[in-house]
Image: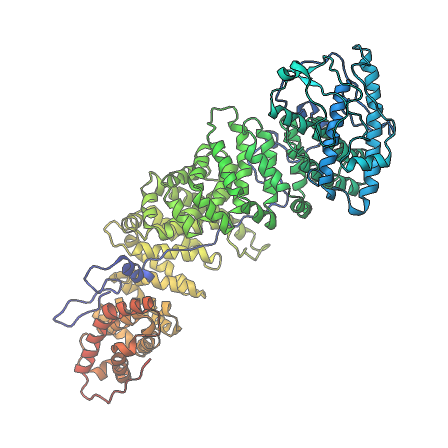
Amino acid sequence: MQPSKDKNTEKAAPFYRLSVPKRKTSSEIINEARNVLRTLRTRRPFTPIEDQRKLFGSGSSRAPRNRPPSVFSLHASSFDLAESRPVSGVRLSPLDHKPELVAFAKDEDFSISFPKPPADAAEVRKLSSARARFFRRTSQGNFLSAKMVPPDQNDEKLDSEETAVMNNLCRSNNNCLAEQRSYTPFNDESRQLICNEHFSRSEREDSLKGTTEKFLFQPGGERSVNSDGRFDDEEQQFPCDQKKKPGTSSSQPRGTDWERRVTGSEDETRKNESEEEEIFWHIKVLPILHELEKEDNIENLCLACTELYQALNEGNMLGKRFKRRSALLKILYKLVDIDSDPLCLKLAKIILAMKVDGKNLLSVCKLAFKICRNEKNDNMIQNDRLLDCLLEVLRTEDLQKNCEALLYCMGAVKCMSGNAVLLNEMVNKGAVEMFLQLMKQINNIKENDTYFSNLGHLLVQVTATLRNVADLPPARCQLICRGAVPELCVALEQRINDKDVCTYIVRIFSKLSSYNDFCAALADCSRCYILFLALLNEHHKQQDLVIRIIFILGNLTEKNNQAREQFFKERGSVNTLISLFQTYHELDLDAQKWYHERGREEKNHPKHPSEAEDVLIKLIRVLANLSIHPSVGAALAAAHRIVELLITVLEYKSIDDCEELVINAATTINNLSYYKTKSSAVQDKKLHIAEMLLKLLMSNNMDGVVEAVRVFGNLSQYHEICDFIMQKKIHKFMIALLDAKNQDVCFSACGVLLNLTVDKNKRALLMEGGGIGKLVDCLQDFGPADWQLACLICKTLLNYSENITSAASCFGEDTDTLLVLLTSLLDEELALDHSLDTDLRDHHKLYWEREFKPVAEKLLDRIQRHHSCLPAVTITPF
């Protein structure tokens, strides 16, 4: 910024030039360019909330016939009992006979089917021994918890439940014995079994205390196990009078056959655990299942399911290795037919905990999704901790084998993410990392794989959920730390033709690129620029996708000079922007024509930007931000098509129609006008631009006025524009703006006046409208707070007073005020605010020393030399 010098010094120069010849730091240059080159900010594109929770939103590009449904019927028949059999570690040989399933004697309609108790005495005695150990551990408080039964109902409930179970077991055992006799010879001398038909209360109480003498089964034999895991039906001799001590094992191995067949302590431990599981099932689980079969009240069913989950968890019966798993799941599947979300939620939690797979996993995931679709269930879902079960499925299940099940599981989680409480919960549980791992697995499946297409449906659910969690600061940190950017870019590259996937990923970037840390991580991913350009070319008519990509590019180029250069250097980048500009400009023209034709019917033009206007706003912002880079800005200034489109916006669009669009266009023209190259399109069209700016200058919008003044500040370096300003009386308007009491307005207006005073024939304009006095007032009002503006005012007054003969005739009645003011501002102790923090004070001092002080000293010296009668100067601190 160079003022005119005295006759023996250098000539006057426009205000935008640098005043200090020495090399400056980048921060100084950026600060100096605050009103010459400016980046633009804008609002993030608005994304409406889906009114319904679905797998795919209403705007999905997937045809309904080509995507999994969000609405479906689900019944007990949707489950497959054959897939619910427990996992067996040993292959057993088939039985010689088909055991019949027992039913409750008191309730013939009870439909639970259970395996029949062992038919031989050894097996029954083994069960007896297990019960003895079971009740002994119960009395010590180690195995069964009293909390399963309410304190006031412990005795009564145990009496009724246990008596019923024992009676049934006794009757069943007798039937088994009778049937067994028809298959194998029974030797009364070698195997003796005594079964009591009635089990008295006193006997049960003795059993609970740990004694086994009065227990239901008398001591008997154990059934041996072959090395291949099959039962050995060879007869074992157990004397009838053999007594067993309380707390000891039910029997001891007899002879060498036992020694050969028992594998060791591990097999014995496994056998004991199985026996204890058998007892736990009959005492704890079976009564609850009985209640589920006969109960028809939803509330009671839900309560029973809660008790069932607690019992199964306590007995370590959750998972795949529980041998009665099939019978249990069969009961639960039947209850699915009851159309009740609270009940289905309880059922889904238990079924998922049983680690079902195949068709059953798919059905239960569908059930969970159906529940989560209804936002009224959110509180219930949170209380029952269904999220934990679903996250476990995502963590453990095979991606390719259970692709569809994971789709509905992830869809349920996506529905949950619409609730703020559940959203925070899943982030706290490490779900973000899990989603990224799942995405990485999907990305590893190549396009020629048969699973590729179906996995795209799953990827939509993952990215849609990540979009929801992206707003949370902890999630944003995890996304950055876990390398989300490159993984999302890989998904974009692989699924560039999948509009749904691309839209959700772009929405994630749109949200997160507003934050500096994520924006920097995205800028460091060099592949992102070419990906964004490819997406713009592929989906150039998809406004919702285009506007977000343009918004992201605007964020990347706002503060990162390297990003500006990288994007510009990508092949076809400028042509892509021009093509988009042309496309949406034409759409906007068509929309405006439509409004004009219907003007009589619809007088009110919508105040918010239309879709086409919104794209143009953000597209022009990218151009403005790119123009900050010296070489990129010079290239864009020479791009005639870009300049023509910007001018066209000023031609057909008024600031009342769309304020942000018009102001952005003016700002971009201002940035491009900074570069004076021989091929500059701005220079070629400068008069036409000045005419368009005149319309903006005369508007009632102060932001528009300021932007027009800024452009005139750069264009006024040309003689043609200076003549235009004088011809249209624009200089009077600039002088009037000095009264605006706004630093930026005064700075821009003063810049135009400075350039006008370079021409000796135009310096007298400052005498019109009290220009000198207004400049002095601005210096007094804003000088100590804005040394750039103070420097600009002094330069203008230096240009004006170049041929001074008398200070009084040149500055008139403002002479004395100006002398006092300059003297004060040049006193470092008085001028600099020492109450500021160190960094800000150093910043002020730098501009005061390098910018203001040299020019102000020269102006003060000139006034003093041409002021014959100096008054007494009183210095007052600011």
Residue 305 vs residue 316, the one in the foreground: 316
Residue 267 against residue 364 in the figure, above or below: above
Residue appearing at x 72%, y 13% in the figure: 233
Residue 364 vs residue 708, the one in the foreground: 364
Residue appearing at x 15%, y 72% in the figure: 6
Image spot of residue 14 (x, y percent): 24, 64
Image spot of residue 432 (x, y percent): 51, 42
Residue 69 can be seen in this image: yes
Residue appearing at x 83%, y 27% in the figure: 168
Residue 855 against residue 714 in the figure, above or below: below
- Coloring scheme used: rainbow
Q: Is residue 488 left or right of residue 201?
A: left
Quadrant in the picture for the N terminus: bottom left
Image spot of residue 288 (x, y percent): 77, 36
Q: Quadrant of residue 867?
A: bottom left
Q: Quadrant of residue 200?
A: top right
Quadrant in the picture for the C terminus: bottom left
Image spot of residue 377 (x, y percent): 68, 45
Residue 351 against residue 585 in the figure, above or below: above
Q: Quadrant of residue 403?
A: top right
Residue 586 vs residue 554, the one in the foreground: 554
Q: Residue furthest left?
A: 8
Residue 825 can be seen in this image: no
Residue appearing at x 27%, y 64% in the figure: 722
Figure disc tally: 0
